[in-house]
Image: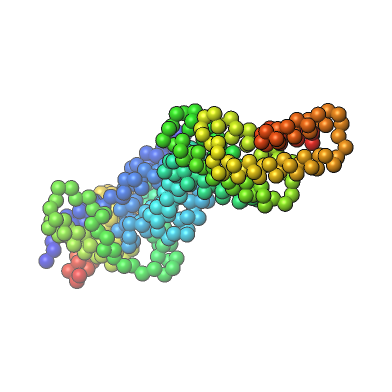
Amino acid sequence: MLTEKELISKLQTLKDIKPRQDWVYLLKSEILNPKSETNPKFSKFEFLISSFFSQKSLAYSFATLLLIMVGVFGFAQYTMPGDLLFSVKKATEQSQAVLSGQTSLKQDMANLNNRINDLAQVTKEGRTANIPSAINEVRQSASKVAESLKAATTKDPQSTRELASEVQKIKQLQTLADLTGTPEIKSLNDALAVLVQNEITDLEKTTLTEVQQTILKDVKDLYDKEDYGEALEKILTINN
Amino acid sequence: MTDLNEQFGHIYDQYIEKIYRFVYLKVNSQEIAEDITSKVFLKGWESFRIQNSEFRIQNEGAFLYQIARNAVIDHYREKGRTKVVSTEVSTQLAQPGKDLQEKAIINADFAVVKSAIQGLKKDYQDIIIWHYVDDMPIAEIAKTLNKPAGTIRVMLHRGLKDLKKLIKES
């Protein structure tokens, strides 16, 4: 039979019950941290998660997972072709383009611009291991732009301006990385040739001032020299 | 940190373990105990902040225990929950330096005692936890429950008797 002393002694072993220290600190900061008061969005977000998952531990795990994902996506934005998380960066860019409702040509041109910037950066920083991948990415993006250019049914002056700018950038980069003669760049050039040819035909049917006629002559010379990027830029000065 | 934050921070440090333990002994799991204890301190903090000349908390401990008692009652009332004794004992007890066999005995003892406490009348539960686990003096229990000290002594005596009986039955 248990004596009263033994019973009290058993009761006193319950003093060993302690809450988790991380929970104690977290709760204290949640209650006393003024930031959580001025940030109702966070409280609501946390409340939603907590309500969705009946157990707090699951809610915290989910919140941690979200934070990790945000971290990965954030970190991926600073990666370059050839890096482990570069595909995440590309996927994010594509999602953003789709969500912003860009046309296929605009998306492809934006991608080409990004890849050209990547190539310029890895070259500038001397990251030799990334250069082959960066070149490959530029080639693939150029090929896509060429395809979209062929499929484009309407002419958009803004796209033409951007395209001229991209082509000029590629031209500048050729001094840094050997892009000449690759089938993709050739395909882009072919598509540009058609675009420039169409522009020349249109301009020939239009009444032009003397200055514009001089520029058109220069455009034709550049077309003959297969300098389509420069030709496009000149065309834009006529159209403006 | 403002003065109020600092003051409540001290109260929090002083009572967090006691309130958690008090709640944990009355509910079935660590998660529920954490959830209820969070609510107790949030409510405590809200009241603490709005104190003025008309409303003043005289005894912070008694005030928090009162919120905790009501929160546990609400918990069981909410969905008609039944009291089931948790088997998750080992994670709750800090037992540094004890071997496995010793820990197993302590855990078994703990489960029996916890189960027996939960079988007691609510008033007996509270005063037994306060007096024997949290070392609260009889005078303070009397003040908290607004009952004479003599009544508390009698209740403690009867509570222990019932507890002994419940442990024997288990």
* Residue situated furthest front in the rendering: A224
The quadrant of the rendering that contains the C terminus of chain B is bottom left
In percent of the image, x 79 and y 42: which residue is there? A201
Q: Position of residue A84 (x, y in %)?
A: 42, 43
Determine if residue A111 is in view.
no
Please name whichever residue, A207 or A148, is drawn nearer the observer in this view of the structure: A207
Q: Is residue A129 above or below residue B148?
A: above
In percent of the image, x 33 and y 52: which residue is there? B20
Please name whichever residue, A80 or B98, is drawn nearer the observer in this view of the structure: A80
Q: Does residue A165 appear left or right of residue A94 in this picture? A: right
Q: Quadrant of residue B22?
A: bottom left
Q: Is residue B159 above or below residue A72?
A: below
Please name whichever residue, B152 or A125, is drawn nearer the observer in this view of the structure: A125
The number of callouts visible is 0
Q: Position of residue A239 (x, y in %)?
A: 79, 36
In percent of the image, x 63 and y 33: which residue is there? A168
Q: Position of residue A81 (x, y in %)?
A: 47, 40
